[in-house]
Image (cartoon, rainbow, N blue to C red):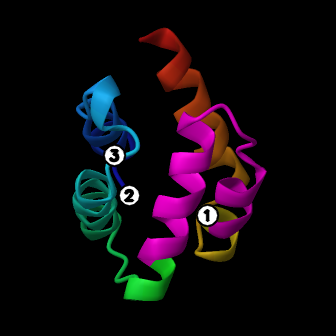
Amino acid sequence: MDINTIIKLVQSVPPDKLTDEKTLKKVIKAASKEAGKNFSEEEIDRFVKDFKNIAKGGSALGLISSLLKSGVSKNQLTDIAKKMEKK
């Protein structure tokens, strides 16, 4: 998985679109394709819901839990967090 590409995809979302369901689904599908994953619509909907909650100031724990269950490692999450902080 190329974490840099996934981070760029997430960073490409304009701040005013961080809660737009259609935009988020598009970005999550692109990121999952980049990661070699094929998430079901139910999984994508759950990721969108969790991401929208985070964008509104909620907790990231639900999204982190979902990502870990989907095969993303703790090290990958740490790398993503570090690279997102650098922006």
Q: Mark 1 points at which residue?
A: 67
Q: Check the picture and name the quadrant holding the N terminus.
A: bottom left
| 2 and 3 marks in contact (CB < 8 Å) | yes
Q: Which residue lies furthest to the top in this view?
A: 86
Measuring from the top left, give residue 61's x and y in whole percent.
Answer: 77, 51
Measuring from the top left, give residue 8's x and y in whole percent.
Answer: 28, 34
Crowd band around label 2 with a 10 angstrom C-alpha radius: few (<14), some (14–19), many (20+) = some
The three-letter code of the residue at mark 3 reads Ile
Q: Name the residue under label 3.
A: 6
| Cα distance between the residues tagged 1 and 2 | 13 Å
Measuring from the top left, give residue 31's x and y in whole percent.
Answer: 31, 58
Measuring from the top left, give residue 85's x and y in whole percent.
Answer: 55, 16
The three-letter code of the residue at mark 1 reads Leu
| Cα distance between the residues tagged 2 and 3 | 9 Å
Q: Residue at x 26, y 41 (%)?
A: 9
Q: Is mark 3 on a helix, strand or loop?
A: helix
Q: Name the residue under label 2.
A: 1
| Cα distance between the residues tagged 1 and 3 | 13 Å
Relative vertical location of residue 22 with respect to residue 15 in this rendering, above or below: below
Q: Check the picture and name the quadrant holding the C terminus.
A: top left
Relative vertical location of residue 81 with respect to residue 6 in this rendering, above or below: above
Q: Which of the marked residues, 2 or 3, is nearer the chain's N terminus?
A: 2
Q: Main secondary structure of the magenta part?
A: helix
